[in-house]
Amino acid sequence: MLAQIITLEKIEWSGEATSVTLPTTDGQITILPGHRKLICAVEAGEVNIKTKQDSLSFFITEGCAEITETEVSVLADLATKAADLTLARVEEAKKAAATAKLEKIDDVEFASIESNLRRELAKEKIIQKYKIKTRPII
């Protein structure tokens, strides 16, 4: 089946897949060829795409997915290969959230900081899953 990850700027990935696993608002789902038609909301998290040769992982932000018997299209604001994620932005978001708790800020700004923190924490889970941490040789 054809699988695509599409952002506002470009098609991040497109190709033939044997399965696609998505983080939906109702939980994680796996789509196989022949899946029934479905349109669903996706939340920030990991998309796994399996092909005949490889397995790919992407971090996506909120969006939606359109699924047919022969195609999976994931539309998200942002998509990044798991291998390209870094912890720097995660740490920045944690600091901003901690500062927001101490300062008096309006509800709209707090909601924005909280939303950003949720996205960055989802990234952190993916980083921890796929990054191999090396220890210095003594």
Image (tube, grey):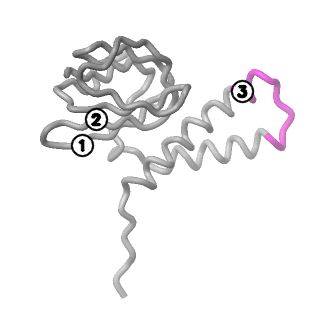
Q: Position of residue 7 (x, y in %)?
A: 37, 19
Q: Mark 3: which amino acid?
A: Ala
Q: Position of residue 78 (x, y in %)?
A: 42, 26
Per the image, is 63 magenta?
A: no
- First of labels 3, 1 by sequence position: 1
Task: Determine the CA span between mark 3 and mark 1.
Answer: 35 Å
Q: Quadrant of residue 54?
A: top left
Q: How many numbered badges does the structure rendering display?
A: 3
- First of labels 2, 3 by sequence position: 2
Task: Determine the CA span between mark 2 and mark 3.
Answer: 31 Å
Is residue 89 shown left or right of residue 2?
Answer: right
Q: Nearest the camera: 11 or 2?
A: 2
Tag 3: Cα neighbours inside 10 Å, few (<14), some, or many (≥20)? few
Residue lying at 68% horizontally and 32% vertically, measured from the top left:
113
* Residue that label 3 marks: 111
Bounds of the magenta span? 101-111
Q: Quadrant of residue 108?
A: top right
Residue lying at 21% horizontally and 32% vertically, measured from the top left:
18
Q: Element type at marker 1? A: strand
* Residue that label 1 marks: 55
Depth-wise, is mark 3 or mark 1 nearer the camera? 1
Locate the C terminus and report the quarter of the image it occupies.
Answer: bottom left
Task: Label the magenta part by its dominant secondary structure.
Answer: helix
Q: Quadrant of residue 133?
A: bottom left
Residue furthest out toward the right: 104
* Residue that label 2 marks: 49
Asked if the residue under mark 1 is in contact with the one under mark 2, i.e. CB atoms within 8 Å, the reply is yes
Q: Mark 1: which amino acid?
A: Ser
Q: Nearest the camera: 126 or 85?
A: 126
Q: Mark 2: which amino acid?
A: Ile
Q: Nearest the camera: 7 or 138?
A: 7
